Structures are given as C-alpha cells and as structure tokens.
C-alpha cells in the first residue's frame, strides 16, 4: 500500500489536471485525445459494456447523492484515497460501472488532503526559506533580509491541495465514476448503505474496501487539536512554535519537525526505540540521524512518553524516568 501511495503521490503532485490525466494515461498506456479526454482501449471497448454502464454522467451541477444516479454498480469502492480513487478510475476505464463512497467532501484521502501532498508543499516552502536565509550566502547570493510569511505558505499549501483534490474530482467526472458523499458501510452481500445528507442503498456486484487507517491515540497524550496535535494540526499551525516536541521519529514526525525547524522552531524528537526511523535499515537510520542532528534536531532515544497535555499557553510532556519537557507545541 505504501508503494502504491508513493506512486500516487507522484501522480497527484502536478497541479495541472491535464498533466494528471497525461500521467495516468502514460502509466496505463492510454491515448489522450486532443480534447484532453483519456481515450483508453477500455473506453473504446466500453460501448460493448453499454448495458452495464449504469454509472451516471456526473456534470458540474450534479450533487454526489443526486437521486437520479443509478444505485447499481459493477464495483462500489469505499474510500477515495490513493487506494480507492485509483481503483475507481481504473475500473471505470476498463468499462465497469463504478461508484465510490467517500465521507469527506473532497476526494483524495489522507494523502492528498492531510498527508503527503500538504506536507511536501510545506517542506518545499520551508526549504526555500531556509536556503535563502542560510544557504545562498555561501554562493555569494546575498539578501538584505529574508523573512517567512507563514500565512502565504499556508495559502499556497491549501491551493496545492485544492488543485489535487479537484484533479481527482475531474478524473471521476471524466471517467464517469459515480460519487456518493457519506459514510459507507456493508449491509449484506452486494449491498452498501451510504449515510450522508440522505440514506442510500447501493447494489454492488463487487465491493472494494479502501478505507485507509486512522492514527492510534497514545496513552496519556491528550490531543486537544491545538497545542497538542496530530500531523493534521501540525500542517496548519498559524505561528512557528518556539519549542516543538515531536513524539515518534518516524517519517511523518521527522517531516513535520523539518518544516518547523527550518522556519525557526527548536525541535525535540522523542523516540521509544534506540534509533530514529526504527522501521528502516539500521545503517540508513544512523546516517539520517547524523544529518538531522547537523540540521539542529535534538533527539531523545529510548524515551517512553507517558503523557502530554496542555499547560498554561503551552504544554508539558512526561517521559518515563526522565525530566518533564516544557514546550509550546506537541506533535503527538
Ligand atoms: C502527514 C503525512 C504525510 C505522508 N506522507 C507520505 C509520503 O510522503 N509518501 C507515502 O507513501 N505516504 C505518505 N503518507 C501516508 C499516506 O497518506 C497513506 O499511506 C495513504 O493515504 C493511504 O491511502 P489509502 O487510500 O489506503 O487511505 P486514505 O488515504 O486514508 O483514504 C481512505 C479514505 O476512506 C475514507 N473513508 C474511511 N472510512 C469510510 C467509510 N466508512 N465511508 C466512506 N469513506 C470512508 C476516508 O475519509 C479517506 O478519505 C503520509 C501520511 C501523512 C499523515
């Protein structure tokens, strides 16, 4: 799944919808007609499946739960993240009638809305700032003064996300994937119930579950969505923390830490294992640790976090057998 998500990150990154279609077309050896329509072997073949294609033609004005939509599909997919939306588009390209149920208003799932895409957008902006501030001078490129406009960075990140979610939306419409807005659940063999603005029942010959995952809360860590947050909140903080504590030295924690470190925060990473990136090859994690330390990261390894909570306007993090850490933001 991770590999698939990586591939899709690459696919969804371009901001132009046409580019997105083009990339998908390249991947699937399709042809793009001059009008921008992806002309697949399957599309051409689809006339033969006309009797099966009960999926609606979604125009810009139709709502996802439009009662005129057909409630019968060859395939119904729960979840429109990288797992679900690629399956939906590909199945439709192969001539099947496809419905996709997504509970969020925008398509793309964690990766596009609150994961890979926004984090990479902020990584790029913060990297440019950091280079301009500390890197360019050694090349003899000097600025009078460099400052970060965080509101502008956040605005750009939101635009990148919007362009990518709209790209998926566009591909759904182009490929006639019927979209259902609401919480989907299996209600028996070949039956999916969608609970949204209204309750719908869809008949499906096949069902694909692509509902992704949610983060497991850490015992004692009181996420308040503000001072103590998850990566979702850390992607949208309106000000640079003075001292950020990141719990967990996995890829996402280090990514979030990098963004805020480059923008000026002091960053302490607490990791239970005896090395960072514990899921990776030991040699890679040792090299990565040297690089991150050089950048200014502070690591406490073998640190078992027993709690994190709001305290005054900041937070306090408790670690088994070690002194409490006072900070102003926690990425739990
Ligand atoms: C900050 C961050 C950065 C990341 N960076 C990377 C990266 O650089 N590279 C990488 O490979 N991965 C990255 N990831 C991980 C990546 O986002 C996930 O691996 C990927 O999104 C998983 O895709 P998915 O389709 O399985 O699930 P998701 O993207 O989670 O999609 C599941 C969808 O199903 C919907 N859903 C769930 N239940 C229901 C229901 N009952 N009814 C209707 N809809 C439902 C959800 O709303 C969601 O939209 C990152 C994650 C985060 C949080």
Image: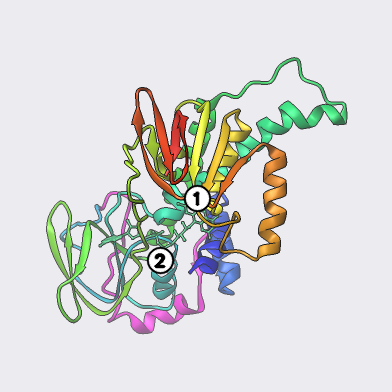
View extreme (left): residue: 199
Magenta span includes 40: yes
Q: How far apart are marks 1 and 2 (CA)?
A: 40 Å
**Which element is circle 1 on?**
loop
Between 31 and 150, the one lying in front of the other is 150
Residue 167 shows up from this direction? no
- Please state which of the two labelled residues, at mark 1 or mark 2, is closer to the viewer: 1
In the image, residue 96 lies at what x, y percent? 35, 78
Q: Which residue is drawn at 60% across and 44% down?
A: 299
- Image quadrant in which you'd find residue 134: top right
Between 252 and 302, the one lying in front of the other is 302
Magenta span includes 164: no
Mark number displayed over residue 248: 1
Q: Earlier in the sequence, mark 1 or mark 2?
A: 2
Between 83 and 25, the one lying in front of the other is 83
Between 175 and 150, the one lying in front of the other is 150
Residue 257 versus residue 273 in the image, above or below: above
Badge 2 is on which residue? 175
- Image quadrant in which you'd find residue 309: top left
Q: Which span of residues is magenta-colored? A: 34-62
Q: Residue at x 35, y 57 (%)?
A: 214
With 184 as the anchor, is 121 left or right in this view?
right
**Classed neighbour count for the residue bearing mark 2: other residues with Cα under 10 Å, few (<14), some (14–19), many (≥20):** many
In the image, residue 6 lies at what x, y percent? 55, 62
Q: Residue at x 50, y 50 (%)?
A: 248
View extreme (top): residue: 144
User: Ligand 1 near label 1 (Cβ, under 8 Å)?
Assistant: no
Q: Residue at x 38, y 69 (%)?
A: 88
């Amino acid at each position: 799944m991770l590999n698939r998500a990586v591939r899709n990150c690459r696919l969804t990154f371009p901001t132009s919808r046409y580019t997105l279609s083009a990339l998908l077309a390249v991947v699937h050896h399709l042809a793009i007609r001059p009008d921008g329509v992806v002309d697949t072997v399957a599309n051409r073949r689809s006339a033969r499946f006309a009797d099966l294609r009960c999926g609606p033609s979604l125009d810009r004005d139709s709502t996802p739960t439009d009662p005129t939509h057909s409630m019968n599909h060859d395939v119904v997919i729960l979840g429109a993240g990288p797992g679900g939306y690629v399956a939906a588009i590909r199945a439709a390209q192969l001539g099947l009638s496809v419905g996709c149920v997504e509970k969020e208003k925008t398509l793309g799932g964690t990766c596009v809305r609150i994961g890979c895409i926004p984090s990479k957008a902020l990584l790029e902006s913060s990297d440019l700032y950091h280079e301009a501030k500390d890197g360019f001078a050694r090349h003899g490129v000097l600025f009078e003064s460099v400052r970060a406009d965080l509101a502008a960075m956040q605005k750009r990140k939101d635009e990148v996300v919007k362009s990518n979610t709209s790209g998926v939306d566009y591909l759904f419409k182009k490929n006639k994937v019927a979209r259902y807005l609401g919480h989907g659940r299996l209600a028996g063999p070949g039956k999916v119930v969608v609970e949204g603005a209204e309750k719908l029942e869809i008949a499906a010959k096949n069902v694909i579950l692509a509902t992704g995952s949610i983060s497991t809360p850490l015992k004692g860590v009181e996420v308040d969505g503000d001072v103590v947050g998850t990566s979702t909140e850390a992607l949208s903080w309106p000000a640079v923390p003075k001292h950020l504590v990141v719990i967990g030295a996995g890829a996402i924690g280090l990514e979030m830490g990098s963004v805020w470190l480059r923008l000026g925060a002091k960053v302490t990473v607490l990791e239970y294992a005896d090395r960072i990136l514990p899921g990776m090859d030991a040699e890679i994690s040792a090299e990565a640790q040297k690089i991150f330390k050089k950048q200014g990261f502070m690591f406490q390894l073998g640190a078992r976090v027993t709690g994190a909570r709001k305290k005054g306007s900041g937070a306090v993090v408790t670690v088994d057998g070690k002194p409490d850490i006072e900070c102003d933001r926690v990425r739990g």
